[in-house]
Image (cartoon, rainbow, N blue to C red):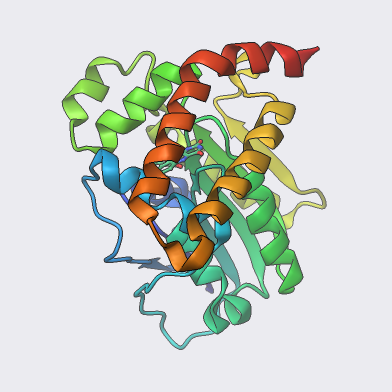
Amino acid sequence: MKNLLVIYYSQTGRLKEIISNFVKSWNGFFNIDFVEIKCDAIPFPMSYRQFFDVFPESVLKLPAKIDYTIQDKEYDCIVFGFQPWFLHTSIPINSFMQTDDFKKLVKKTVILVSDSRNTWRNSLNEVITEVEKNGGNLKGSFIFRDTAKNRRGFFSLYNWLSGKKKRIEKASSTGGISQEIIDSASIYGAKALEALNGENRVYCVIPHVDEEITSIKYEQYAIDKYLKWAKFIRKNNFKHRKFKLLLFKIWLLFMFFVMSPHISNKTKE
Ligand SMILES: Cc1cc2nc3c(=O)[nH]c(=O)nc-3n(C[C@H](O)[C@H](O)[C@H](O)COP(=O)(O)O)c2cc1C
């Protein structure tokens, strides 16, 4: 039987649940090894301050210390689980993509699985670029997402991250990835299995609800601004980091609550 490596980072355990459902039907076809990337520097639950504190490193792709154990085996296929942080790839995944292990492992057939709120496209592009640059044969990308509107989704995510899971459960019809979607991962995993032998690359967003997706122009606008803020915070070796992060927080909340509906409308024009 062929060997499959499932490798992922999951701060809250949500992607871990999605990904284990995803590969359920692969059992008869592959010997499966699960490897979870750990990053002690990133806590869960996460306070409001800790949430914003990962901003500059996420955007600037600065690596953190990560831990994982990969067996010395020849793998035929990799299922790689990642998530976006501040529109970029999360620090643990970015750190892993900078290792020789990643560069060696990824030269195989690759399926990507991600969980996110509503802005995954930039991070997906970053991961695809790394996979392809290092010789991976990408067969499919499966994005599991939250369908809540921007502001509501932000608070649901924040409640979830701060450990107030009960509140997100109450808001499950509008916030967070519902249990139904998490459970449906096994169905999409079966599709991914078919994609392995297919000619075309599969791109699947689950659930697919067009009108809830933030416009590309708006995302690009935010990415440009984030980069400027991250560079500013990093300036002089992070001197006055706390104060600069406070300024960023004020700017972000202002953009989020006052400006974003206006910018959203403008970018749709
Ligand atoms: C610091 C931070 C920033 C995040 N930024 C985004 C984002 O820009 N876009 C998005 O869709 N989701 C964002 N998320 C949500 C994550 O992508 C992910 O869905 C959520 O943290 C659940 O993570 P887990 O399943 O990996 O534990 C963010 C989460 C964290 C912790």
- Residue 32 is drawn in which quadrant? bottom left
Q: Quadrant of residue 36?
A: bottom left
**In which quadrant is the C terminus drawn?**
top right
User: For residue 170, what is the image quadrant?
Assistant: top left
| Relative to 162, 149 lies left or right | right
Residue 179 can be seen in this image: no
Compare residues 251 and 195 and report the one nearer the observer: 251
Q: Quadrant of ligand 1?
A: top left
Name the residue rendered at 55%, 53% in the picture: 232
Q: In the image, what residue occupies the spot 71% across and 44% down?
A: 202
Identified at 38% across, 51% down, the residue is: 20
Q: Residue furthest bottom?
A: 72
Camera-side residue: 10 or 181?
10
Q: In the rendering, at what x and y percent does residue 231 appear? A: 57, 55
Evaluate whether residue 98 shows in this view. yes
Image height of 31 relative to 160, above or below: below
- From this view, report whether residue 15 is shown above or below residue 138: above
Q: Residue at x 47, y 59 (%)?
A: 57
- 195 or 138, which is in the foreground? 138
| Residue 115 coordinates in the image, percent (x, y) | 47, 41
Q: Is residue 250 left or right of residue 42?
A: right
Q: Is residue 35 above or below residue 226?
A: below
